[in-house]
């Protein structure tokens, strides 16, 4: 059996924390609970145990299908002159930064990573006791990098570090970009192709040049790298840099702390084009509760951030490469670049949010094809060597029938995410949910039935997820329940 999970986005969140003294002299801190609780792995372990009890499953491959480590969205990049995007192969000086980020991620996710190694390497449960059902089972963890953790594949040192973190055999070998288990392949016979899925997203994948080594083109920076860091991570970082002294004042800083928390949560909003609607939602709540309008402060904060991001986009030739979306190629034209930069410099603050919302909607208009449409074009599927294509990347679980030769039905399966998501609802209301999705693919001898695959999707509801402002004396208790 193969179990596929993706988009954990384990992140260095302690960098977002700052402390202050409350009105009664109590120690408080602001930050964000975004990473995954080890209890989520307990749910997955229980499902594997159920498979073993029902069907005597003997082999389980746990595929970590990309964006497991959040290398892009971290203040570590913003604290120095280096950036994770580049033309051609990554320069050597990025290696030490990536190692530093991996070390920070490991520190901030120690409990989760310990539980992962304990359950799926050492075969022990959350109490450290041997898992009886795993005793005769062969377990293997397989890792595929995505677009947010592609840089870990660039150097032997980072590849070794990832293997150490995951508890898998340590060596310098390059991680695969896809896994294919064909129907008639000896020892496999799953009929499945697994990839992260950013290959189906032109904003986050650079199309290969004829004759180019696959490992090299996977290393090239896409447009999405710039947006993830210079907007996704920079908003909260630069707001804190600008207003931290004010935010540490118990009473006067309250509204600014609330906006900072909204900017921390900003990164989890889906779909992308609603991110600034969420910011408007947060600003309106602050206005209703405190009677203070922060629209101008936010807009002026965004001005240098957007200007810097646009300068990066417009000054780099790699945004005009073949296969790059026409929107980015248009923006890099000399006259268009001049107009956009002038607008960012001179436009009234109220127009800046409108500009970003328009750009995000244009992005959605440019990228109209769904992942399943691209998955249906996979050569192995057309040849009938697989009938399942599994990918993640979108953070939206999905199961879509696709055309496949022969008598079997073909399917595209999206593995969703385990990350906290903030979805929009009717009337521009937003709410937090922590998702969990896995896909299980079976060989014919795995099950005593005709089932080819299972998907499970649920949500974990907890008061301790998302951005927080709390006393530091009390450790937050994670109250987790399965609600869907």
Image (cartoon, rainbow, N blue to C red):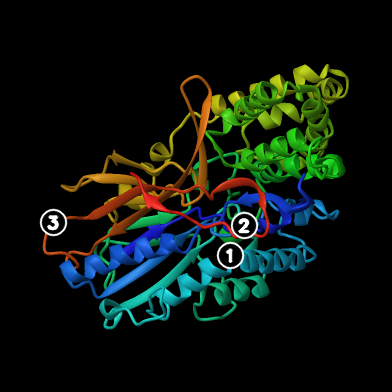
Q: Earlier in the sequence, mark 3 or mark 1?
A: 1
Provide residue 75's location: percent of width, then percent of height: 75, 53
Quarter of image, res 2:
bottom left
Find out whether the residues at labels 1 and 2 contact each other: C-beta distance under 8 Å: yes
For image coordinates 50% across by 53% down, the residue present is: 7
Provide residue 243's location: percent of width, then percent of height: 84, 40
Quarter of image, res 332:
top right
Q: Which residue is mark 3?
A: 450
**In the figure, is residue 99 to the left or right of 127?**
right
Circle 3 or circle 1, nearest the eye? 1
Assign a secondary structure to mark 2. loop
Q: Which residue is mark 1?
A: 109
For this orientation, the residue located farthest to the front is 24
Up/down of 482 relative to 275, above or below: below
For image coordinates 27% across by 40% down, the residue present is: 403
Q: Nearer the viewer, residue 26 or 147?
A: 26
Query: 10 Å neighbourhood of mark 3: few (<14), some, or many (≥20)?
Result: few
Q: Earlier in the sequence, mark 1 or mark 2?
A: 2
For image coordinates 18% across by 73% down, the residue present is: 56
Q: CA distance from mark 3 to mark 2?
A: 39 Å
Q: Which residue is mark 2?
A: 11
Query: 10 Å neighbourhood of mark 2: few (<14), some, or many (≥20)?
Result: many
- Split into 4 quadrants, where in the image is the C terminus? top left
Provide residue 472's location: percent of width, then percent of height: 68, 57
């Amino acid at each position: 059996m193969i179990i596929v999970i993706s988009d954990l986005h384990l992140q260095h969140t302690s960098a977002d924390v700052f402390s202050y003294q409350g009105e009664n002299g109590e120690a408080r801190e602001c930050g964000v609970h975004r990473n995954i609780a080890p209890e989520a792995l307990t749910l997955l372990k229980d499902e594997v145990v159920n498979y073993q009890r029902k069907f005597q499953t003997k082999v389980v491959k746990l595929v970590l299908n990309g964006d497991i480590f959040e290398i892009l969205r971290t203040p570590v990049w913003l604290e120095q002159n280096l950036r994770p995007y580049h033309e051609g192969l990554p320069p050597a000086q990025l290696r030490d930064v990536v190692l530093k980020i991996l070390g920070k991620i490991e520190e901030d996710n120690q409990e989760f990573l310990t539980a992962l190694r304990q359950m799926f390497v050492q075969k022990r449960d959350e109490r450290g006791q041997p898992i009886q059902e795993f005793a005769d089972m062969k377990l293997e963890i397989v890792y595929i990098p995505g677009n947010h953790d592609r840089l870990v594949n660039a150097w032997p040192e980072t590849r070794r570090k990832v293997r150490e973190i995951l508890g898998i055999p340590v060596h310098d070998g390059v991680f695969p970009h896809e896994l294919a288990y064909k129907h008639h392949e000896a020892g496999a016979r799953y009929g499945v192709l697994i990839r992260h899925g950013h290959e189906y997203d032109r904003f986050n994948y650079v199309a290969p040049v004829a004759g180019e080594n696959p490992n090299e083109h996977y290393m090239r920076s896409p447009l999405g790298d710039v947006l993830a860091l210079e907007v996704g991570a920079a908003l909260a970082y630069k707001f804190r840099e600008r207003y931290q002294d004010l935010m540490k004042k118990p009473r006067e800083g309250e509204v600014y702390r609330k906006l900072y928390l909204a900017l921390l949560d900003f990164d989890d909003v889906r779909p992308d084009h609603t991110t600034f609607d969420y910011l408007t939602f947060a600003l309106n709540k602050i206005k209703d509760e405190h009677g203070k309008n922060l629209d101008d402060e936010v807009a002026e904060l965004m001005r240098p951030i957007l200007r810097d991001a646009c300068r990066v986009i417009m000054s780099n030739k790699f945004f005009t490469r073949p296969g790059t979306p026409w929107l980015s190629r248009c923006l890099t034209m000399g006259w268009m670049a001049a107009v956009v930069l002038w607008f960012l410099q001179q436009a009234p603050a109220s127009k800046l949010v409108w500009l970003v919302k328009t750009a995000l909607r244009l992005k959605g208009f440019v990228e109209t094809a769904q992942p399943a449409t691209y998955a249906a074009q996979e050569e192995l599927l057309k040849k009938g060597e697989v009938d399942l294509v599994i990918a993640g990347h979108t953070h939206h679980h999905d199961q879509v029938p696709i055309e496949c030769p022969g008598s079997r039905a073909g399917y595209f399966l999206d593995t969703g995410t385990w990350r906290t998501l903030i979805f929009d609802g009717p009337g521009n209301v937003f709410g937090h949910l922590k998702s969990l999705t896995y896909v299980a693919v079976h060989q014919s001898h795995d099950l005593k039935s005709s089932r080819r695959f299972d998907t499970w999707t649920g949500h974990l509801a907890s008061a301790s997820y998302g951005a927080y402002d709390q006393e530091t004396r009390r450790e937050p208790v994670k109250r987790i329940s399965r609600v869907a």
